[in-house]
Amino acid sequence: MKFSVFIAKRYLFTKSSNNAINIITLISAISIIAGSAALFIVLSGFSGLKDFSLSFSSIFDPDLKVIPASGKTISFSKKQAEDLKNIEGVAYYTQIIEERAFLEFRGKNHIAYVKGVDENYMRVNNIDSTLLYGNWITPEEPVAAIGFGISRILSLGVNNYTDLLRVMVPKPGTGQFTDPSQAFNSSQLVVSDIFQVNEEIDQKYIFTNLEYVRQLLRYNDSTLSALELKIKPSADPLAVKDSVQKLFGDQVEVKTRFQLNDKLYKMLNAENLAVYMIFTLVLIIALFNLVGSIIMIIIDKKANIKTLHSLGASLKEIKKIYFLQGAMMTVFGGLIGIFLGALIVGAQLQFQLKMITPTLPYPMEFTLVNFLAVFFTISILGILASYLASSTIRPKLLVD
């Protein structure tokens, strides 16, 4: 083995007397370096995009959410509230009442969801990082925090006590109304804050205090739309989920943040896998250069192969020389490519070379998973290519 490694290293780092062989080997090495660098950069870019996309869900969606198994509401008694506090792993919980509402301001209309929350909401969700200006809602006053999109659509600012925002929700019940004005419960609000998450959420939600929405919908004290929970960092989300599910029984469904955004996660993972497969195919095509260069080296070193065989080297050892040469070229080229890719990713993170918008740089992220994926992909493919090339050495080559 030491003999094969020594000869392979000499062939790898020593120029051939044939200039054409040197050029082919150089092209092969550049293909490996460029392919591994490109794969690392693209995977790092998709990792950054994935985290960027999921950052919105981490702001707006809780660790766990208790929603009705059927219908629009759940029952939450004082006994269940005490038991929920005692579940190991639950840090905070917040009560939610949510309903579709019709908003009206100075003749402009918009349909959104009014979301009543209690004083624990900001402990459960990181909504405070999205607030632009003003003051967050208080439990005592009829004030609201609206999305930037709603503010733009209705031309509505903060702290306007002269013209109030009117909120209307359908009255519960069955049958038809002869007077449309009697079909809604309505009330007025002062906008105290504006938040900005993304375009969809900014046009969809208006936050106000829990009691305001409860009175608007005529709900009793034990009726809620949902519960949102923040779990302790050391807790197991699935274990906490099971405990909460046992507490409420079949009347509710408990979902993790992943389950709340399962379509988004699946889409991002599918895109990541598709890009990985495409660039792996590019690497496979690039490694054909490696196979060709090793075969050309074998032809060029035909006389040396006979000499090594005459000196006692077996066919297996001679094959191993060229196998190791190709494998080392692949591993070293892959590491150099990953290093160059890491420099480019680092430059993007540090100097923001590529911008999506004038204020938003293209997101990228260093991850160990990407490094290992590129390294093992290029190594495995390179080893297979080297094996195929070295297997072209036949016994008749030793005697011809």
Image: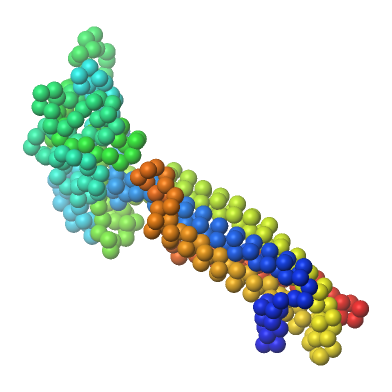
Instruction: Name the residue rendered at 72%, 67% in the picture.
Output: 23
Instruction: Name the residue rendered at 39%, 56% in the picture.
Output: 351
Horizontal side, residue 53 vs residue 180: left or right:
right
Of 191 and 77, the residue lying toward us: 191
- Is any part of residue 225 visible from this angle? yes
* Quadrant including the C terminus: bottom right
Instruction: Name the residue rendered at 32%, 37% in the picture.
Output: 201
Of 97 and 7, the residue lying toward us: 7
State the residue lying farthest toward the top: 178
Quadrant position of residue 155? top left
The answer to whether 242 is drawn above or below residue 227 in the figure is below
Q: Looking at the picture, how far across and down is residue 157, in whole percent?
A: 19, 30
Horizontal side, residue 394 vs residue 55: left or right:
right
Quadrant position of residue 235? bottom left
Horizontal side, residue 221 vs residue 183: left or right:
left
Q: Looking at the picture, how far across and down is residue 192, in whole percent?
A: 15, 35
Q: Looking at the picture, how far across and down is residue 77, in whole percent?
A: 17, 43
* Quadrant including the N terminus: bottom right
